[in-house]
Amino acid sequence: MFIDTHTHLYCEEFDADRAEVVARAKAAGAEWLLLPNIDEASIGPMLQMCADYPALCRPMMGLHPTELPADPSPLLDRMETMLTAPGNPFIAVGEVGIDLYWDASRREEQIAVFERQIEWAVRLGLPLVVHSRSAHRDLVETLRPYADALTGGIFHCFGGTADEAHELLQTFPRFVLGIGGVVTFKKSTLPAVLSAAVPFNRIVVETDAPYLAPTPHRGQRNESAYVPLVLQKLAGVYATTPEAVGLQTSQTARRIFARL
């Protein structure tokens, strides 16, 4: 059994066969599929999927750093209204963060948007699901002032160095690293980083579907049914069984996502 802590199965890539994808995920052992939001257009499909599969899917709310509108404030206002509505379904603030990989021209704006969303998580007592790419130093400096106030969260799709992993885990003791298909890639440095710097109880598993499918499906559409391939690789890294990895990462995910 496992919890896919980060999957975008509501995306259009799955419109033709979503029911089959969900059935395969359940057959593979999925207990929960956790759905981070991306932008305004993704809110409706995400919530529809949660309505269609209420025993399996839970939504998050956030604005992805590469999806900022020209003026992000009105959209952020609407998202905040949804997050603070009585009885809302959201289990986390995410997917939020800083991404300077393709374009650093809106760096300051990304940081300001990230800070506003961090403040939501603090005020509402929700975990934070963080996207960071080519932005480690900005991420740490932006998030550090809130380290004691946040209930916890995930550094999604972690792919950094052992030093970066150590800094994140030491600076943010309630956070864990999200590990997905990249750990299975032939030339990935992630297995060595994990064995050197990351305790077994400081990771969760994810797909980021439809992206980053694990070997032997690399380059194809990813889906939650492929999580067992990640569990198998992590079992080798931590000298245990895939079942033990599934159990531990699920326990960790339940600790992070208290609303599950």
Image (cartoon, helix red, strand yellow):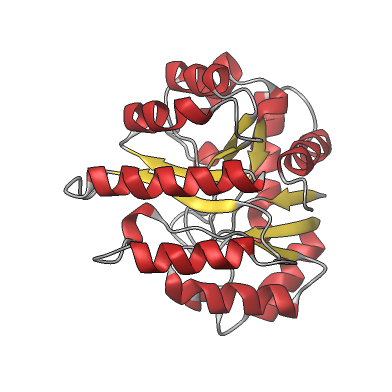
Q: Position of residue 254 (x, y in %)?
A: 78, 43
Task: Name the residue furthest left.
Answer: 105
Residue 207 visible, this orientation: no
Q: Position of residue 214 (x, y in %)?
A: 54, 49
Q: Is residue 64 above or below residue 138?
A: below
Residue 20: quarter of image? bottom right
Q: Is residue 59 above or below residue 234?
A: below
Seen at 66% across and 76% down, the residue is: 49
Seen at 62% across and 22% down, the residue is: 173
Q: Nearer the viewer, residue 232 or 70?
A: 70
- In the rendered structure, the answer to whether residue 227 lies left or right of residue 165 reads right
Q: Position of residue 141 (x, y in %)?
A: 37, 26
Task: Name the residue furthest bottom.
Answer: 16
Seen at 50% across and 58% down, the residue is: 62
Q: Is residue 125 above or below residue 33?
A: above
Q: Is residue 84 above or below residue 107?
A: below
